[in-house]
Image: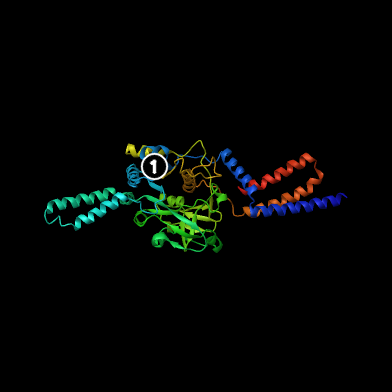
């Protein structure tokens, strides 16, 4: 009778093991919630590595800035003025995390240009050439002053250190790049070495939207704006590159890190489980980086956009740093979960960027998947052998431990 009971326990143990292996592939929603909670708690209470002074500073277009400078979107010359201020203050790199895919509608400029054309066609110059020349000169100057997009482009060109985001739509069949941007994107492509076809398909993008042509051509670089490949991994992992028409387009944080190291994208090599950047390796898992968050004792420095703009100078702490400019107002704020405390998008990008440049990312060994499967088999076998010999309370404690352990190894 005891032998039959033991056989039944072994059979039940085998079934449970197979169920857990299936869960590891299917990722049911109730396990996902538990795993997210365990991940967030581990990050919050983990002492982590010693963190020095951050190389990343956030400049927020926040509620205070919107109250004093007006509702969003602002005239883009204000962004240009901020770029000029930061460049003059010695900022090494500027990440402009703002959607600038189209030129800004400007009715006043359109009306002025229409009047200018009519004025040139009117035979006024024949009667008073001096007055006509004076009018032409001032009309041209007024057009320049009203053209916010042109002023932004000029600031980007002068600074030579601005990186912009490109919007991507994931999918396996490329539809095309808006405004013929393939030539511009080719300059951003990473170098591929021994990259499997399955990984290329996994990170494929079917459409890429880049900033309007004049801005895109004068920016230092561009990177895709997709934070995670799958929504369930948002806040935990980061998609480091996408495959578009054979180009390996780096992410916005990775492109900033490449520029911070004074490299060109083609000097960065992507292999199956790592990215080689200036003599060191960045561990990735299926194209994604596992993100480690900066602890609350050493947060990223943050400044309201309006404070720097009104002061007309950057704080000394910004010298030599990477400045991230982005929306962080209450209505427009995008929160990333399950990152600790649902961090803002700007803080999420800052953490990813710091992980890359300071090598503080979480490393998941390539053998971890096989180790997890083996561990489940071993734990299932041990449980099947010991359960018949244990009391009710001991069984409950062991069962709880066996449920939690796979979750912990899954985020290790």
Residue 42, quarter of picture? top right
Position of 303 relative to 191 (above/below): above
* Picture mark count: 1
Please name the residue shown 48% across and 38% down the image.
Answer: 299
Position of 27 relative to 42 (above/below): below
Q: Position of residue 338 (x, y in %)?
A: 56, 44
For label 1, the residue is 71
The answer to whether residue 314 is seen in the rendering is no
Q: Nearer the viewer, residue 37 or 266?
A: 37
**Local SS, label 1:** loop
In this rendering, would 52 be left or right of 377?
left
In this rendering, would 43 be left or right of 405?
left
Q: Position of residue 161 (x, y in %)?
A: 36, 50
Please name the residue shown 54% across and 43% down the image.
Answer: 339
Please name the residue shown 58% across and 42% down the image.
Answer: 40
Q: What residue occupies the far left of the structure in this picture?
A: 127
């Amino acid at each position: 009778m005891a032998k039959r009971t033991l056989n039944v326990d072994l059979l039940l143990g085998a079934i449970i093991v197979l169920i857990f292996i299936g869960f590891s592939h299917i990722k049911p929603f109730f396990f996902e919630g538990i795993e997210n909670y365990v991940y967030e708690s581990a990050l919050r209470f983990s002492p982590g590595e010693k963190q020095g002074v951050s190389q990343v500073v956030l400049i927020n277009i926040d509620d205070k800035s919107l109250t004093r400078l007006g509702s969003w979107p602002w005239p883009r010359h204000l962004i240009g003025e901020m770029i000029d201020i930061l460049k003059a203050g010695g900022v090494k790199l500027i990440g402009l995390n703002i959607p600038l895919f189209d030129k800004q509608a400007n009715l006043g400029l359109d009306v002025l240009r229409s009047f200018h054309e009519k004025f040139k066609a009117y035979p006024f110059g024949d009667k008073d050439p001096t007055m006509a020349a004076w009018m032409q000169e001032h009309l041209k100057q007024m057009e320049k002053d009203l053209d916010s997009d042109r002023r932004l482009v000029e600031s980007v060109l002068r600074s030579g250190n601005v990186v912009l985001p490109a919007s991507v739509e994931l999918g396996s069949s490329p539809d095309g790049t808006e405004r013929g941007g393939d030539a511009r994107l080719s300059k951003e492509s990473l170098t591929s070495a021994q990259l499997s076809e399955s990984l290329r398909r996994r990170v494929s993008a079917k459409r890429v939207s880049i900033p309007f042509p004049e801005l895109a051509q004068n920016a230092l670089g561009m990177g895709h704006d997709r934070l995670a490949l799958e929504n369930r991994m948002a806040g935990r992992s980061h998609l480091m590159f996408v495959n578009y028409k054979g180009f390996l387009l780096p992410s916005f944080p990775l492109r900033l890190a490449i520029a911070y190291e004074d490299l060109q994208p083609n000097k960065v090599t992507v292999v199956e489980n790592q990215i080689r950047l200036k003599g060191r390796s960045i561990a990735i898992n299926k194209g994604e980086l596992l993100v480690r968050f900066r602890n609350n004792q050493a947060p990223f420095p943050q400044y309201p956009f309006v404070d720097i703009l009104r002061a007309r100078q950057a704080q000394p702490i910004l010298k030599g740093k990477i400045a991230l400019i982005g929306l962080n107002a209450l209505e427009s704020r995008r929160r990333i979960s399950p990152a600790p405390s649902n961090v803002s998008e700007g803080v999420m990008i800052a953490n990813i960027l710091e992980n890359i440049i300071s090598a503080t990312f979480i490393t998941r060994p390539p053998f971890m998947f096989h180790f997890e499967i083996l561990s489940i088999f071993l734990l299932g076998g041990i449980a099947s052998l010991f359960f018949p010999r244990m009391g009710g309370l001991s069984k409950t404690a062991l069962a709880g431990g066996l449920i939690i352990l796979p979750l912990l190894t899954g985020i290790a």
